[in-house]
Image: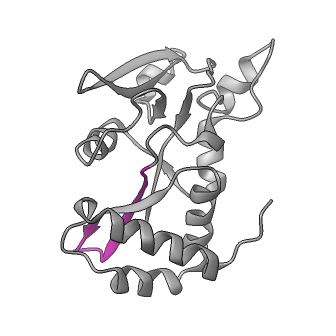
Amino acid sequence: METFRNEDLLPVLKDRFEKNMSRHEGLQWADVEEKLTNDEDKMRSLFEMERTGGEPDVIGYDSVKNEYLFCDCSAESPKGRRSVCFDLEALQSRKKHPPENNAMDMAASMGIEMLNESQYRTLQELGDFDMKTSSWVQTPPEIRKLGGALFCDKRYNRVFVYHNGADSYYAARGFRGFLKV
């Protein structure tokens, strides 16, 4: 595992922030950086998002809670989080050829949350994401209870929501996360 260092990650985040101002109009990097430098746990989560190919960037701000919302903004589903089934129950149910990990546990270990369908649609308003890949999203309990899970992608200038068995996994399917700072 790579060694985590704030001084390596902050310039990467700042550069991405400045190159993609349309994702966070009206926000200032200095304000974001001040919050980041005071929260080692959030920095570790952002490091994990970056390390696994998520290219995290600020996509919003909650003025009531004084929180910046970071999200994976890589063009395709993060490469270091693909080929995973949905959750631990799905992983344990695979008798043959189980994947190495599952999306829900990976997100938890990174200290992030998986996007839900609404958040995924909001992300797609900021650009074109998952044009060749797909991403697991949080799944309602009534669907998960029946063995299914939801994933999304964007094709033909439209966001699609699909279902699959939660135990399925594909080289082109991962998950996107978000983090409140």
Q: Quadrant of residue 94?
A: top right
Residue at 60 percent across and 79 percent down: it is 40
Residue found at the very far top of the displayed protein: 96
Prevalent SS, magenta region? strand
In which quadrant is the N terminus drawn?
bottom right
In which quadrant is the C terminus drawn?
bottom left
Q: Is residue 114 left or right of residue 129?
A: right
Front in this rendered view, residue 100 or 66? 100
Q: Quadrant of residue 158?
A: top left
User: What colouring style does the render use?
Assistant: one colour
Examine the rendering and report whether any part of residue 149 can be seen. Answer: yes
Check residue 87 for magenta coloring: no
Front in this rendered view, residue 55 or 117? 55
Residue 43 appears at what percent x and percent y? Answer: 57, 73
Check residue 64 for magenta coloring: yes
Residue 69 appears at what percent x and percent y? Answer: 36, 63
Q: Is residue 156 left or right of residue 169?
A: left
Residue at 35 percent across and 80 percent down: it is 29
Vertical relation: 106 (above or below) 19: above
Residue at 51 percent across and 21 percent down: it is 145
Vertical relation: 31 (above or below) 15: below
Residue found at the very far left of the displayed protein: 26
Q: Is residue 72 left or right of residue 109?
A: left
Magenta highlight range: 60-73
Examine the rendering and report whether any part of residue 181 can be seen. Answer: no
Residue 84 appears at what percent x and percent y? Answer: 65, 30
Residue at 50 percent across and 38 percent down: it is 77
Vertical relation: 84 (above or below) 121: above
Front in this rendered view, residue 147 or 39? 39
Front in this rendered view, residue 20 or 98? 20
Residue 178 appears at what percent x and percent y? Answer: 44, 54
